[in-house]
Amino acid sequence: MMQSKGSSSVVYNRLSVFRAERGLSRKDVAEKVGVNPQTIGYLERGDYAPSVELALKLSALFDLPVEHLFSLKPFTPLAQSLRDPET
């Protein structure tokens, strides 16, 4: 989660979930989208919000809509989503 300067926006993400699901290391993801592996770590911990370009590259890498990776609202926990698909 990242707070923007002068704003209260927080960007939530599920990057680590999709990265782990595909068996990719932070280094693998970083190389594929052209950033430093530390950047992927910062994103996963919520210490950094991605640029639009980086968010789009990551969504393309995982073949997912960007809103499945990033959100301005907290994601419903995956276990709860599986129990109640309408959430």
Image (cartoon, grey):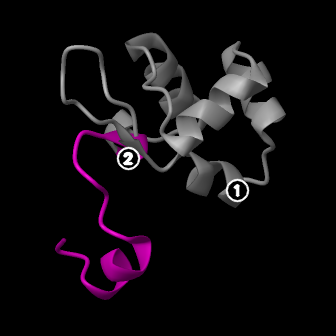
Magenta stretch: give its range: 68-87
The answer to which of marks 1 and 2 sits earlier in the sequence is 1
Left or right, residue 40 beside residue 6: right
Q: Is residue 35 above or below residue 15?
A: above
* Residue 62, position as x, y percentages in the image: 58, 40
Q: Is residue 21 above or below residue 51?
A: below
Residue 74 marker: none
Examine the structure image and report whether residue 58 is included in the region drawn in magenta: no
Examine the structure image and report whether residue 75 is included in the region drawn in magenta: yes
* Residue 56, position as x, y percentages in the image: 45, 22
Of 5 and 87, the residue lying toward us:
5
Of 13 and 67, the residue lying toward us:
13
- Residue at 38 percent of width and 34 percent of height: 66
Residue with the mark numbered 2: 68
Q: Mark 1 falls on what kind of element?
A: helix
Q: Which amino acid type is marked by label 1?
A: Ala
- Residue at 43 percent of width and 25 percent of height: 49
Q: Is residue 57 above or below residue 15?
A: above
User: Which residue is farthest front?
Assistant: 6
Within 10 Å of disc 2 (Cα), the crowding (few <14, some 14-19, many 20+) is some
Q: CA distance from mark 1 to mark 2?
A: 15 Å
Residue 86: quarter of image:
bottom left
Q: Which amino acid type is marked by label 2?
A: His
- Residue at 42 percent of width and 80 percent of height: 79
Image quarter (top left, top right, bottom left or bottom right) of the N terminus: top left
Residue with the mark numbered 1: 20
